[in-house]
Image (tube, rainbow, N blue to C red):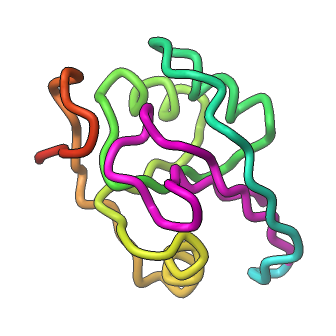
Amino acid sequence: MKIAVASEGKMVTEHFGHCENFNIFELENNEIVNTQSIPNPGHRPGFLPNFLNDMGVNVIISGGMGGGAIEIFNEKGIEVITGANGVAETAVNSYLQGKLKSTGSVCHEHHHHDKCGN
């Protein structure tokens, strides 16, 4: 299983598409066995969900995300968790413990960089 966290360094970012990097956590038996940070290859409509799908990601965690990206992830069978914050690895561990649930935070405007609403 692979979990991607849209991040600014090691912290969960507020907006998926404009993140600095994706922290990718590989898991076996609900334990993190490998972690890598991949720079965001660029925000283009529909690109990032396909990019992460091609990497084998099963779950994406972010502070907020646009509705189009959520739809593509859903079509690919990738679980979307929005409304997360804090340290990326802590968010992943919370998810694994069943404590991190999506708030459904959807970004409707893209002229901003760091604030998303419900």
- Where 62 sits versus 12, above or below? above
* 96 or 90: nearer the viewer: 90
**Residue at x 57% of width, y 59% of height:** 9
Residue 38 falls in image quadrant: top right
Residue 95 locus on image (x, y percent): 51, 75
**Residue at x 42% of width, y 53% of height:** 62
**Residue at x 22% of width, y 49% of height:** 105
- Residue 24 among those drawn in magenta: yes
- Magenta span: 1-28
- Where 18 sits versus 35, above or below? above
- Left or right? Give the position of 16 relative to 118: right
* Position of the N terminus by quadrant: bottom right
- Residue 40 among those drawn in magenta: no
Residue 89 locus on image (x, y percent): 60, 76
Residue 116 falls in image quadrant: top left
Residue 19 locus on image (x, y percent): 48, 42
- Where 33 sits versus 45, above or below? below
- Left or right? Give the position of 92 relative to 106: right
- Left or right? Give the position of 112 relative to 33: left
- Where 109 sits versus 83, above or below? above
